[in-house]
Image (cartoon, coloured by chain):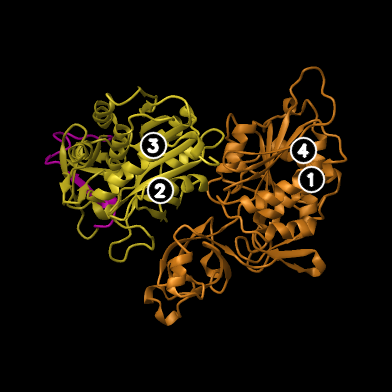
Amino acid sequence: MTELLPFLKSLMSVSALSGFEGPASEIIEKEWTSLVDEVSKSKLGSLHGLKRGNTNIKGKAKRPSILIATHMDAVGMMVTKVVDGFLYVTEIGGLDPRILPGTPVLVHGKKDLYGVVAMRSNRLVPDDHRTYEHDLDYLLIDTGLTPKEVAKLVRAGDLVSYNTQPIEMSGGEIISGHSLDNRASVAALTVCLQELQTRQHLWDVWAVATVQEEETMSGAYTSAYQLKPDIAIAIDVTFAKGPGSSGWDTFPLGDGPTIGLGPNVHTFIHKKMKEIAERIEIPHAIDFLPRHSGTDAYMLQVADTGAPTLVISIPLRYMHTPVEMIKLKDVRRAGRLLAEFIASLDADFINKISWE
Amino acid sequence: MKKLLKTLTETFSPSGYEDAIREVIRKEIKPLADEIRVDALGNLIVRKGKGGKRIMVAAHMDEIGIIASHVDDNGFVRFEGVGGVMSRHLIGGRVRFINGTVGVIGSQRGKENSMEDMFIDVGATSKKDCPVKAGDIAAFERPFTDMGSRWVAKSMDDRIGVLVAIEALRALKSTPNEVYFVFTTQEEIGTRGATTSAFEINPDIGIAIDVTISADTPQAMKMDVGLGKGPAIKIKDSGMISDPRVVQWMEKTAEKAKIPYQREVLGGGTTDARSIQMARAGVPVGCISIPCRYVHSPSEMVDENDVKNSVKLLTLLLKTESKNFGSL
């Protein structure tokens, strides 16, 4: 069983963009193999870990199951065209082009190449684009190689990922780097599986590392169809309070995970989760999700014949940038809270669910 | 091939009203298919072969269109777009309603950029003698033009895909696979026909045949696709990432047969492959795109060689022996 920090850092050190999650999947599979009874893959590449319920169930009743989805893909870029040795790119997932200039990247061509996101001098940009908001159309990637060399190594469709190493801050309690969205949640789910090793739980647990959340959420949608859980929970990141973001929809780093509430969340599951958080004294906040939760839960809710869903989120600063930031405490708490919730599920839980 | 394309593109079948085009296609494929059926959404499903990999090939047979929203007292028809209609392509153009009525598109003076300020003139003098009523649907009226090696027509999106699918079916004398050619409905309003047909067929692999933007015109978008350089193998569009295993299968097949191809990363739009990918427990998908200039205008242009090479590539893919699918 790996410690949380080195595990999370290894997850943040690989490039695994939406649709190309292989490298992250490998690390997760290695870690989960000893924590679950079975590991398999969906047709789209989502990783399914099954930890069977370990307490007796009465008679011939079917053992209920809960699915916990954490997406393992990350945002990044893809080459659209090579012009004079420079690369034009489009985004995979949502990027904020303002933070891109100056970012070190890896270009995954025939071999991995170092590159930087560059932009023309403001003087050379057309008048109507001369602002501080830089359209992706006006950014390019420079690998330092000659056009001839680039033509041999890079073509349209090659991936470009952030090339920044994870940084420990505040004595290792805060970590910053790319892909914390959503590898921090993968780590939280792993903490949950570790907790469950010494716990009794009646329900089967499907730990799922989903693909393509940042693009189509097709991973969560298809895995939920395949596994048909009785309850589905997504763990994702949410906006932390920080410079310029202090509204009702932001949450302090280090004050615990958030429990979602809104139409994408079943109020009964929400209430139960909140009760458990209070009972075991895990600090938490309520994340109001008035519409689309922006997480896998959106698809988990409507896959197959539908399922009651919940969203648990870890506060994170600077989402989708190479310097995302979280507090490890929140990851541990999210994992512990989930484990406690799973252990609390009895055979009759589904029948007790009521609507408001 | 050209004659069939002329018929296909000159047929009027906007999303939701695919009856006319379905009959054209049905007539053409009837002698070629092992089984033909139409599902609840109007998709024309054509099976060829039995056993082996279940491969779904989707070419959408609908086209973008215009729908009348109301007729004013002077007999001018106000309208909205069905699918991704762009107002800049409309003024001075003509449309044909399903009932045969032809109209010309005009606009209020100085307001040429907004569909809300445009109207269709069908020659009526009042609401009473207007042959069009609210809810009537129309498509662009524009004849097929043969420019030699380049062909121009309305609804090349995606009748050229329909043509490629039909020609591949024709060329496919036999296949070790179970191939479902699906001529889908309602793609332009959200890939809806593909959603239900993929659910029903539950394929092992999905391939969409559609057009993509040809970015070789002045000041075009930054994209590595041009006319005449071969079929485009889609890597990504704004609604779908192709399965890398399918991309590899397509590229290897093209390289082995020396078919030129291009790698497509499209910034806007998506295809039926998106819906196939999300069907049931998920389907590995890819897309062969025919490069096309002026997509969603009444004058969409494709290149003859790209079309022929697309047919060749699709036919070879569908003939793949089970041992050659690799990790798929």
Q: Which chain is orange?
A: A
Q: Which mark is residue A272?
A: 4
Q: Which residue is mark 2?
A: B256
Query: Residue A9 location in percent, x, y?
Result: 73, 60
Q: Mark 4, residues whose alpha carbon is within 10 Å: few (<14), some, or many (≥20)?
A: some
Q: Which quadrant of the view contains residue B37? A: top left
Q: Nearer the viewer, residue B287 or A67?
A: B287
Q: Which of the two marks, 2 or 4, is nearer to us in this view?
A: 2
Q: Are marks 4 and 3 in contact (CB under 8 Å)?
A: no
User: Residue at the location (86% across, 45% down)?
Assistant: A280
* Residue under label 3: B58
Label 4 resides on the chain identified as: A
**Chain-order first, disc 1 or disc 4:** 1
Q: Which residues are magenta?
A: B112-135
Q: Position of residue B252 (x, y in %)?
A: 44, 48
For label 1, the crowd category at 10 Å Cα-Cα, with few meaning under 14, some 14 to 19 and many 20 or more, is: many
Are the residues flagged by discs 2 and 4 from a single subunit? no
Q: Amino acid at mark 1?
A: Cys
Image coordinates of residue A104 in percent, x first then y, are 59, 71
